[in-house]
């Protein structure tokens, strides 16, 4: 897996999404999304962060208005 650095903007966008999702419940849809992310070649598994959008995936998957940037969910 290739690693790439996040831009400051990507990091901050991820932080905002993390804050928004803090109170969001886990659903069957978010569980499926997380499984997809965890098997994706574009994830930093150590930090559970998408290498394309920079989002913390464990939180991103809980937001209904979010989508995978490459259409995997
Ligand atoms: S959001 Fe999409 S591209 Fe990013 S880790 Fe999840 S499945 Fe992969």
Image (spheres, rainbow, N blue to C red):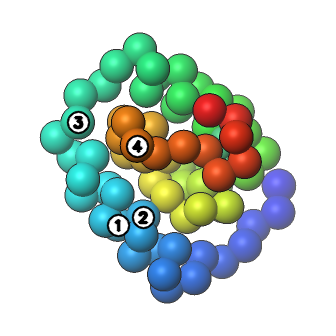
Label 2 lies in ligand 1 vicinity (Cβ under 8 Å): no
Question: Number of labelled discs?
Answer: 4
Query: Tag 1's secondary structure?
Result: helix
Question: Residue 33's quadrant in the figure?
Answer: top right
Query: Tag 2's secondary structure?
Result: helix
Return the residue at label 4. Answer: 65
Labels 4 & 2 near each other (Cβ < 8 A): no
Return the residue at label 2. Answer: 14
Quadrant placement of the C terminus: top right
Quick check: 34 above or below 14? above
Query: Tag 3's secondary structure?
Result: loop
Label 3 lies in ligand 1 vicinity (Cβ under 8 Å): no
Query: Badge 2, how many Cα within 10 Å: few under 14, some, many 20+?
Result: many
- Going 42% across and 70% down the picture, which residue do you hit? 13
Q: Which comes sooner in the sequence, label 4 or label 2? A: 2
Distance (Cα) linking label 2 and label 1: 4 Å
Distance (Cα) linking label 4 and label 2: 14 Å
């Amino acid at each position: 897996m290739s690693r790439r650095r996040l831009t400051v903007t990507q990091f901050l966008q991820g932080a905002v999404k993390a804050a928004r999702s803090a109170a969001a419940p886990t659903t069957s849809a978010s569980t499926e999304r997380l499984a997809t992310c965890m098997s994706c070649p574009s994830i930093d598994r150590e930090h559970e962060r998408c290498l394309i959008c920079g989002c913390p995936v464990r939180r991103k998957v809980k937001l209904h208005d979010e989508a995978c940037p490459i259409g995997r969910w």
